[in-house]
């Protein structure tokens, strides 16, 4: 019994090590990589906040937008571009819910690069993990 448990632990550890070695590393956009406007792989943009509401101001959910983008019932160009800014050499969005929806949909997102972070948006920089992921409140 102890041998089986030990074998399972060793197998699990071996799989974790393999995943760390083989799993592709996430590559984020750099300030010099982005044009003024365009589309970009949403997984290359960092979140500025540590959490977001699961719904937009109009009541639609982030998940519903992702589904509609993925199945083609919403045209990505009909969604306002996310605003991205450079902070400490890294690219962050000021529009975290739209970024999350496009990440879930797996399609490129329209963006507009700002020259600086608007003062009224500084409060958004609450990320605890360098913008790699975000928590959806209420889920």
Image (cartoon, grey):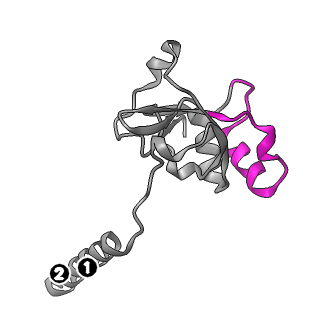
Residue 4 place in picture, x, y as percent: 21, 86
Residues under numbered marks 2 and 1 in contact, where contact means CB atoms less than 8 Å apart: no
Q: Secondary structure at mark 1?
A: helix
Per the rendered image, the range of residues in magenta is 57-82
- Please give left or right for residue 20 compared with residue 93 in the image: left
Residue 136 place in picture, x, y as percent: 52, 38
Of mark 2 and mark 1, the one earlier in the sequence is 2
Name the residue: 55% across, 44% down.
34
Q: Assess disc 2: are there few (<14), some (14-19) or many (≥20) residues with their C-alpha within 10 Å of its C-alpha.
A: few
- Please give left or right for residue 73 compared with residue 33 in the image: right
Name the residue: 82% across, 47% down.
75
Residue 118 place in picture, x, y as percent: 52, 17
Name the residue: 82% across, 46% down.
74
18 vs 3, nearest the viewer: 18
The relative height of residue 101 versus residue 3 in the rendered view (above or below) is: above
Q: Residue furthest top?
A: 120
Q: Residue furthest left?
A: 2
Q: Is residue 37 magenta?
A: no
Q: Is residue 69 magenta?
A: yes
Q: What label sits on residue 6 in the rendered view?
A: 2
Residue that carries the numbered disc 1 in the rendered image: 14
The relative height of residue 77 versus residue 21 in the rendered view (above or below) is: above
Q: Secondary structure at mark 2?
A: helix
102 vs 44, nearest the viewer: 44
Q: Residue furthest right?
A: 73
The relative height of residue 134 versus residue 69 in the rendered view (above or below) is: above
Residue 122 place in picture, x, y as percent: 45, 18
Q: What label sits on residue 58 in the rendered view?
A: none
The image quarter in which residue 2 lies = bottom left
Mark 2–mark 1 Cα distance, whole angstroms, equals 12 Å
């Amino acid at each position: 019994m102890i041998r089986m448990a030990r074998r399972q632990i060793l197998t699990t550890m071996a799989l974790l090590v393999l995943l760390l070695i083989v799993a592709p590393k996430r590559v984020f956009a750099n300030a010099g990589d982005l044009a003024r406007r365009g589309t970009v792989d949403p997984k290359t943009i960092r979140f500025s906040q540590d959490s977001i509401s699961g719904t937009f101001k109009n009541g639609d959910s982030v998940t519903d937008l992702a589904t509609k983008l993925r199945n083609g019932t919403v045209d990505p160009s009909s969604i306002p571009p996310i605003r991205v800014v450079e902070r400490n050499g890294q690219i962050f969005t000021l529009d975290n819910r739209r970024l999350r929806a496009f990440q879930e949909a797996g399609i490129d997102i329209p963006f507009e690069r700002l020259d600086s972070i608007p003062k009224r948006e500084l409060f958004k920089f609450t990320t605890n993990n360098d913008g790699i992921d975000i928590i959806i409140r209420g889920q």
